[in-house]
Amino acid sequence: FGQPGVEAEAVRSDVLAALGPRARALSVRTWKEVLPDLAALFGMADAYDLILYFVMYFLAALGILNAQRMSALERRREFGVMLAIGVTPARLARLLLVETVTLTGVGAALGALWGGALATYHSIHPLDISGGRATQDGFSYLGLTLDYQVRFHFHWDMVVEPVLVIGLVGLLCGMWPAIRSARLDIVRAISGRT
């Protein structure tokens, strides 16, 4: 019953099933029914999380777009020469997209490794938020006593989902520089007039 990530409704059903006929005389409620204010607070936290994720992915997209656009601008002559010796515009665009996705993938993998290692560490060694008040047992909020030790719980979807999202963001951000580079005027690009 006490495993992290288990839904309260599933636990309630299991408890009712385990009690059998005795369950009629008892009231088995989930924490959301007992503490609706706290449930509403967690709902607001989920909404704030979505806003935070959007802002983080948006900033990452701007960084990727800026890096790839500047890289494409600095390499105009190189792209002009490639187009002049027979590389097709579609192949040049694919090359730049592969470059963008590769760089984004390496960054996402390093971030996932670092974040996963940090979450694993804090699942073993809880984060202390006592602020020097370690002698107290915890603090109460909305009738619930909370511990000063924050223990992380690591799940693979915490790593896989951001890597996939940032990979898609990288692909989308790499399209504009790739298409612009594939449409270069060869003579102007080689002469440095674009």
Image (tube, helix red, strand yellow):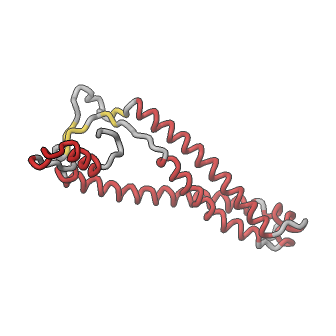
Is residue 176 positioned above or below 145 on the image? below
Residue sitting at the far right:
85
Q: Which residue is located at x 65 percent, y 57 percent?
A: 67
**Outermost residue, top direction?**
135
The correct choice, above or below, for 109 with respect to 89 in the image is: above
The location of residue 108, given as percent across then percent down, is 58, 49
Tell which residue pokes out farthest to the front in this image. 21
Residue 3 location, quadrant = top left
* In front of the other: 9 or 135: 9
Q: Residue 132: x percent and y percent? A: 29, 29
Quarter of the rendering occupied by the N terminus? top left
Instruction: Reply above or below: 55 against 131.
Output: below
Kindly indicate the quadrant of the structure image that contains residue 144. Answer: top left
* Front residue of 99 and 5: 5
Left or right: where 149 falls relative to 72: left
Quadrant (top left/top right/bottom left/bottom right) for the C terminus: bottom right
Give the side of residue 25 with respect to residue 49, left or right: left
186 left or right of 97 in image? right
Give the residue drawn at x 40%, y 29%: 125
Locate residue 32, reporting x and y percent: 22, 52
Q: Nearer the viewer, residue 6 or 61?
A: 6
Left/right placement of residue 29 relative to residue 98 reads left
How many numbered circles does the render carry?
Answer: 0
Residue, x 33% and y 46% (percent of image)? 6
